Amino acid sequence: MTATMPSPVILDGAAVRLEPLAPGHVPALFAAGGGDEEVWRWLPAAAPRTEAELAAIARDLIGDDRHLPFAVILKETGRAVGWTTYIDTPGFDHSVEIGWTWYGRAVWRTAVNTECKILLIDHAFGRLGLNRVQLKTDCLNTRSQAAIRRIGGTWEGTLRRHRRRPDGTWRDTVYFGILDEEWPACRARLLARAAPAPATA
């Protein structure tokens, strides 16, 4: 398992800043994605209908010592647009999971998710000295699976009937991993894909 869950830290990028999730982020988070069924479709909680409901979900997440959640702050506006989390990984040595992630629709198909993953994975393999990052998702969530493969995740297996979804149906969970020695090449590909195309004559 992760020997010690990472300590809270601020991770600063070009487009986003990750800072420890706090109750003060809830109003902006609710404005970004509260009540949006599509945003919350694959998450382990039903879409919150009120700020109070979202605050309760955030409070449980913050208080769970198996999780270290970050608010995703869009630097252009200074407002929280989602959250993402380091999660303990029982059964694995020197490993951490990145998950329990959501973003408001306004930042879908932007640089936000890629930059968040680069910040979190860089920190895991660099400052924390871990050797494996794990990511998992619902077997039906093909958009998330494609995003994980795009950042370099290797499919490691599918855990059948892993847990119930909020609607009571059973979820099969697809697992991916990135090893420390694989990350430099994955990171370089991501940065090259994000770089602007050279000007032509």
Image (cartoon, rainbow, N blue to C red):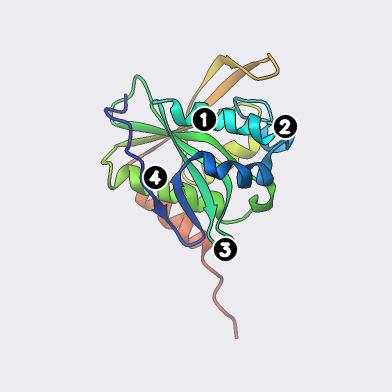
Q: Is residue 179 visible?
A: yes
**Gap between marks 2 and 3 measured at Cα:** 27 Å
- Image location (x, y in percent) of residue 164: 61, 15
- Image location (x, y in percent) of residue 66: 40, 25
**Gap between marks 4 and 2 measured at Cα:** 32 Å
Query: Nearer the N terminus, badge 1 or badge 3?
Result: 1
Quarter occupied by the N terminus: top left
Answer above or below: position of 116 versus 13. above
Answer above or below: position of 88 versus 102. above
Q: Are marks 4 and 1 in contact (CB under 8 Å)?
A: no
Answer above or below: position of 40 versus 71. above
**Gap between marks 4 and 1 measured at Cα:** 25 Å
Query: Nearer the N terminus, badge 2 or badge 3?
Result: 2
Q: In the image, which disc is placed on residue 49?
A: 2
Q: Residues within 10 Å of mark 1 (few under 14, many from 20)?
A: some
**Gap between marks 3 and 4 measured at Cα:** 23 Å
Looking at the image, residue 126 sits to the left or right of residue 55; the answer is left
Q: Nearer the viewer, residue 198 or 15?
A: 15
Which residue sits at x=59%, y=60%?
77
> Label 4, on which residue?
121
**Gap between marks 2 and 1 measured at Cα:** 16 Å
Report the amino acid beneath label 1. Arg
Q: Nearer the viewer, residue 124 or 79?
A: 79
Report the amino acid beneath label 2. Arg
Q: Are marks 2 and 1 in contact (CB under 8 Å)?
A: no
Report the amino acid beneath label 3. Glu
Query: Nearer the N terminus, badge 3 or badge 4?
Result: 3
Q: Residues within 10 Å of mark 2 (few under 14, many from 20)?
A: few
Q: Secondary structure at mark 1?
A: helix
Q: In the image, which disc is placed on residue 59?
A: 1
